[in-house]
Amino acid sequence: MLRPQWVVLNKKSLLFALALVLFLFLVIKGAGIFMSRGVGKMMPPQQMLATGIEKTRSSASFRYQAETRLTTEGKAGLDFFSKVEGERVAPDKVHMTGVMMNTPIEFIQVGENAYFKDQPTGQWISLPGNKLSDSELFYAELNPLAYFNFKDVPDLKYKGLDRVNGEKLILLEMRPNLMDPFLELRLSDYYYKVWLSPADYRLRQASLQARDKQNPDSGIEINLRIWDYDKNITINPPVVNPAVFSRSVPAPPDLFFDLY
């Protein structure tokens, strides 16, 4: 006849066992929350990308940095073609400052009106009836999300979580076909690396490269960073000196095709 046996635990062992159970519970719960957000391979890469672009575009506001360099034999030059920081407020307000072709520049767009600061005098020049923030010549500087209008993305890979500036972000690599014919008129073989927030998939950083169709050893490299989503950002028209003549914009130089 078997007799019942009692296992006697001292107080120290009991506390250790309870702590271990609590730890395992928190680990399992945390993993469930992590997976429910779609981080990792729980959400297909195509869905991650589509969700991130949609949420980024629908943001009320954000700040961004864009750096553009020319490349030769796949290596970026030391000098920037442009290096700017800006902020956008939906639906049609932009403020950008920085340098283009070694020249300081500051720009404001409010509705259908654009404003440039004349650097030598510090006076603002009004350009009424011109929505330059949608101009193809200044996509990287004024409308970086224009580079995310895709026909399709046949080559898209999930590369895991990547630590960037102390933050773990989702890394995707892809070779998309772009919707805008202007962006594919001179350049080809676009290659992107995109970092998304694990919390909501919105774009945090991106790096893209493309080759010059006429000179495959040359091309362009653009690095983007986006932050401060949905913050309270105010962009107002600048004070224009009445003595400064407001005028229409002349046909802009073909900067894009003069890069090479």
Image (spheres, helix red, strand yellow):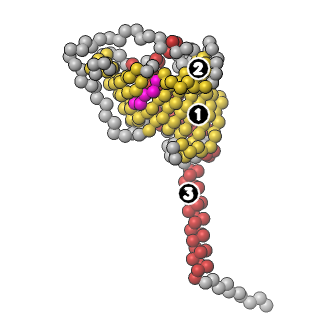
The answer, for residue 188, to whether it is visible in the render is no
Q: Position of residue 142 (x, y in %)?
A: 42, 25
Contact, mark 1 vs mark 3 (Cβ under 8 Å): no
Q: Position of residue 47 (x, y in %)?
A: 58, 37
Q: Which residue lies furthest to the right in this view?
A: 1
Q: Which residue appears farthest toward the front when viewing the image?
A: 78
Res 62 → quadrant: top left
Q: Is residue 95 magenta?
A: no
**CA distance separating discs 2 and 1:** 16 Å
Badge 2 or badge 1: first in the primary sequence = 1
Q: In this view, does 230 lie to the left or right of 187?
A: left
Span shown in magenta: 82-86
Q: What element carries label 2?
A: strand
Which label sits on residue 172? none
Residue in the image at 52% along x and 47% along y: 166
The numbered dot on residue 193 is 1
Q: Mark 3 points at which residue?
A: 30
The secondary structure type at the circle numbered 1 is: strand
* Amino acid of disc 2: Gly
Disc 3 is placed on an element classified as helix
Q: On the rendered structure, is 202 left or right of 6? A: left
Q: Which of marks 1 and 3 is in front?
A: 1
Give the percent coordinates (x, y) of residue 175: 63, 28
Q: Residues within 10 Å of mark 3 (few under 14, many from 20)?
A: few
